Image (cartoon, helix red, strand yellow):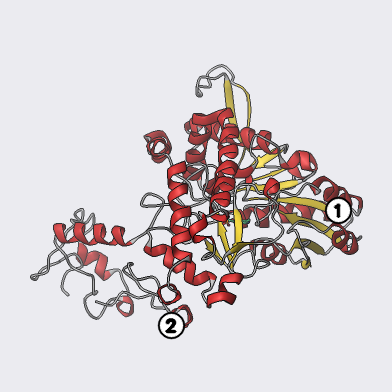
Amino acid sequence: MSNLFDFKGNEEFGYSQPPPIEDPQRVKASIPTTLLRKERAQWPTASEPELVRHYTWLSRRNFGIDTGFYPLGSCTMKHNPRLNERIVQLAGMNDIHPLAPENHLQGLMAIFYEMQDMLAHCSGMDSVTLQPVAGAQGEFTAIRCIQEYHRTIGEEHRDKVIVPDSAHGTNPASAAMCGYSIIEIPSGDDGRLDLDALRAVVGDDTAAMMITNPSTLGVFEPDIAEAASIVHEAGGQMYYDGANFNAIIGRTNPGLMGFDAVHYNLHKTFSQPHGGGGPGSGPIGVKEHLAKFLPSPLVSRRPSEEGEIGVGDGWWYEWEEPENTIGKVQQWHGNAGAVVRSWALYRRYGRELTTMSEHAVLNANYLRYKIMNPSPEIRDKIHAMPADGCPADVVKHEFTLSMTPLVEAVGVNGKDVAKRLLDYGYMAPTLYFPMIVPECLMIEPTETESKEELDRFAENFHAVLSEDPEILTTAPHNTDVKRVDEVWAARNLILRYEH
Ligand SMILES: *Cc1c(COP(=O)(O)O)cnc(C)c1O
């Protein structure tokens, strides 16, 4: 290859490069020969129409919330208003540099301030940082703050974190990454917290308890305040996994339940495209006694002074670093774009966010009722039953079904049902989680689905259960990719594009 930028030959390129800013030969001369390619890179070549077709084709092979119902429990896959995208793309948001000085960032900082304020308010916390970029990172950050708190008050010998067996895997993982050992406590037969089991394990080695409410079974824990006082009396801290905040926002909050720290999954509760790994945002909120350990960014404000031209609301916004900060957990200002999208949703709906959680709960209960009460003609064909011990009055925004009776009757398992649902044009529900429900399917419809969509899903769900087992065990049949061998795929990962 004689020229770095010389794309000659009969290949076609459906894109154009800006002209090089430097003489290509000089660039090439500055690269050590050992690092130069010996042969030309095997980039795919295509004309513009071919390129457009390729990506459109790929997008149609993909399933997303914009193509169909996505009842993936615990993940809160709801509609992402396009208005959020418009707002985050405004030049004042999109084109700013993270190193820009405060007087260039007043608008964004005002948004950050409002977001901190709103999150603190709706969770009953005193202080919020927007830095962590995922729920899991929020957990790690908050547990580190709790760890520093214990250290500061001479309680560093506390080395255990308690989690219920229904917890999301990130809870024990985050605590373990902070060096804690994990104590798992079993749930009661009704899927709820077993207070005697909790009493049996708390002690002066308890650093914290991590729990989500409603739990991953979608069940609200009415004894949560009692659990909090058991842990507090032993000197431990209470950590709220806020991934299920969509179920309670506006109706109650973790502060009222007795929690000291909480994370929010902005990409779940406050809508933004997620799945496939991001970008998300997992701010944390804490009570006063933990606030001085938070990482920045924290935005504070004071009345603006003469000559300070801010956003015109009479305030001047400033970055603030808490006194005993545990340090940065993420570069720059976290995932600022994710914060702006969630702020857009909050500014659009405000107090109506209460209606959001009410509808999320209503939809889940409606769908659960529809699935559990099929028409008489097919009742005897339905072998799936709900997980035992989920009284209807405590089910919130999601619910679990156990496919064990189906396995016993016809040898069809939860995975087969999930795969067959793909043929009907649905994303499969969350499968085999929480692990305490055997053959578990976990369904979260969210507030953005209509009654008609829920009726259709229940009808199709019943249709799947009444099909010939052979059809289910070999499903999916209508998708581009048929049933894959997950073990083979995991052992033989193909990560390279081969021309
Ligand atoms: C999604 C989820 C988490 C982790 O959040 P990420 O943003 O995916 O890191 C933690 N707990 C529960 C219950 C969740 O559903």
Mark 1 secondary-structure assignment? helix
Residue 334 visible from this viewpoint: no
* Callout 2 crowding tier (Cα within 10 Å): few <14, some 14–19, many ≥20: few
Compared to residue 429, the image places residue 409 above or below, namely below
Of the numbered discs 1 and 2, the one sitting upstream in the chain is 1
Compared to residue 440, the image places residue 311 above or below, namely above
Q: Residue at x 53, y 76 (%)?
A: 410
Dividing the picture into quadrants, the one containing residue 419 is bottom left
Q: Quadrant of the N terminus?
A: bottom left
Compared to residue 226, the image places residue 42 above or below, namely below
Quadrant observed for ligand 1 in the rendered image: bottom right
**Numbered circle sitting on residue 231:** 1
Residue 6 visible from this viewpoint: yes
* Callout 1 crowding tier (Cα within 10 Å): few <14, some 14–19, many ≥20: many
Residue 185 image point, x, y percent: 79, 65
Amino acid type of the residue that numbered disc 1 sits on in the rendered structure: Val
Query: Left or right of 499: which side holds 453?
Result: right
The answer to whether the beta carbon of the residue marked 2 is less than 8 Å from any atom of ligand 1 is no
Q: Say how many tags the image has.
A: 2
In the rendered image, the residue lying farthest to the top is 306
Q: Label 2, on which residue?
A: 492
Q: Nearer the viewer, residue 157 or 442?
A: 442
Mark 2 secondary-structure assignment? loop
Q: Are the residues tagged 1 and 2 within 8 Å (C-beta)? A: no
**Numbered circle sitting on residue 143:** none
Q: Nearer the viewer, residue 166 or 102?
A: 166
Residue 130 image point, x, y percent: 59, 44
Dividing the picture into quadrants, the one containing residue 260 is top right
Query: Left or right of 146: which side holds 404?
Result: left
Residue 332 image point, x, y percent: 53, 48
Q: Residue at x 58, y 68 (%)?
A: 403
Mark 1 and mark 2: Cα distance apart in space: 45 Å
